[in-house]
Each structure stands twice: as structure tokens, then as C-alpha cells.
Image (cartoon, rainbow, N blue to C red):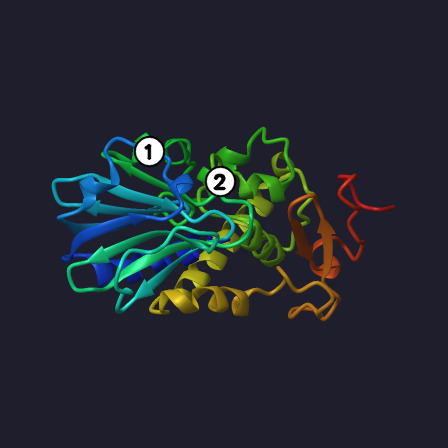
Amino acid sequence: MPELPEVEALKDFLTEHLVGHEIVRVLPVAISVLKTYDPPLSALEGREVVAVGRHGKFLDLATGGGPRLITHLARAGWLHWRDRLPDGPPKPGKGPLALRVALETGEGFDLTEAGTQKRLAVYVVSDPQEVPGIARLGPDPLADDFDEAALAALLAGERRQLKGALRDQSLIAGVGNAYSDEILHAAKMSPFKLAASLTPEETARLHSALRATLTEAVERSRGVAAGRLKAEKKSGLRVHGRTGQPCPVCGDTIREVSFSDSSLQYCPTCQTGGKPLADRRMSRLLK
């Protein structure tokens, strides 16, 4: 799933390639991805793209005097830039193509979604706050005012485990499964630790790890072409997706806890005092 760093990189890439150009056609292929109907997709046509923004994991294309095209790529969605779009309209079918946006230059991009769980979402709105997922977003962790006090206030009274709290978009915007693993590894904290139990020193450590992990990932992704961002993300991960491999910090074997639709990875030595975490049916350390 694209998270804050990849969506930030896509925002920068699209700012360079879209701003100042006219949208001539918006072609829906999978109607299910369109979550709004008024204004219609055709209201974007003939409009110049004036800005590209990001709200958490949402991409926001603003047009001059017209509506915005907002996209959430979900778990298996992606944006593919085309220096030259194919001639003729795309054919609906069982392929991954969901939406195509064409510019006056002949360039454009496709939105695709792999797999059977279709969660890619496209909105055409006048105001980003009309998108329910944006309206309920928590603060952006890379915002200038997101300091240790802000994080402490968010976690005060939070009875969930750190892993779940970090992934909650209404608490902190933009962090998903992969970067929550990376942040907790950098902070040397168990994913099962209760968020409200953090001491001031631990909160400061978590804040530092959160900012540093995301900032470094954004910098690694900056300037990378849209088609290479997935590979760039994977190459920079230390623990997520690396079950059975040695921890790059201490050399211990990275372990995994599996859930019904996801999994987490962690280093026992760095994060849990050398003890393996319980399986998904337990929320405590094995004795």
C-alpha cells in the first residue's frame, strides 16, 4: 500500500508533469472506483491543472475554476505515468486499469488496481473536506507543528497498542502497515506496547523515530519516477517484509505476527527484550 512517503513523491512527480497542462479526457474503466457523481468526471475536461496536493494518503489534483480529482490508491492501487497514451479509448474488462487521464500533450496517467479486493477510490469534489476519509484525518506527522507535545496529546488515554494507534488515520495521517513497523523498530518499542503507557522519554523517542523514518523515506523517494517508487520503498525497509532475515541493527532474526488480512514484522532483540511476541490471538508477550 502506498503510504505517506510514496504519495508525497507522487505529488512531487505529478506537480512537475501535470501543473500547467490541460485535462482533455477522463476515461473511467472500472465504474466502481468512482465514489462521487456530482460534479461528473467530465467537469474536469478542458480544465488546467493548477496544483497537486496530499492529504495523508490521498492525492489531490486541483483544476483552475473547476473541481478537484482526489484519489486514494488503497492497498493494491497504483498510478502509472504514460509519456504517450495509447490511441483510442480503453476497453472495460477484467484487467487492472481503472481510470485514465489524458492531457493535451498526449501524455497522461492510468490508475490501476491489482487483485480482487477493489478499494481504489476516486472522488470529484469542490472541496477536499467533502471526501469522508479526508474530513476525519488526524494531523500530518511531517507538519511543522507536529512536535512531541502534539504526539503526547494524541496518545494520552489511548488504550490501543502502538501498532494499531500509528495506523489509525484519524489519529495520525499517512502511516500504514509498513512504516509503522519501521517506526517502532527505530524507536526500539514493541508493537504491542499500550500507547497510553509511554513515558515522556519514550514519547520523545517515538516522535523522533516517526519524523526521521518518514523524512528519510520521503528523501529517498524524491525524484524517483512513479514506476520505480514501489521498488524504492521496499529497498529502504529494515524489518517490514523481511521475516527470517537478520536485523540490520543487531543481527537477530526478524520475526512476524500474522493477522487475518495483514502481518507485522519486528526484531525481538531491538524491540521486545529478546522475547518473541504472541500470535494474533494474544496481545501480550509469551512468558
Residue 22 in the figure: left or right of residue 281: left
| In this picture, residue 176 sits left or right of residue 66 | right
Q: x and y percent of residue 213 in the render?
A: 50, 58
Q: Is residue 217 left or right of residue 156?
A: left
Q: On the image, numbered disc 1 is attached to which residue? A: 36
Looking at the rendered structure, the secondary structure element under dot 1 is loop
Question: What residue does disc 2 label?
Answer: 151
**x 27%, y 54%: residue:** 101
Q: Quadrant of residue 188?
A: bottom right
Q: Position of residue 266 (x, y in %)?
A: 68, 57
**Quarter assignment of residue 165:** top right
Amino acid under disc 2? Leu
Tell which tag, 1 or 2, sits nearer the viewer: 1
Cα separation, mark 1 vs mark 2, equals 34 Å
* Horizontal relation, residue 201 to residue 246: left or right: left
| Viewer-side residue, 93 vs 134 | 93
Tell me which label, 1 or 2, sits earlier in the chain.
1
Dot 1 amino acid type: Thr
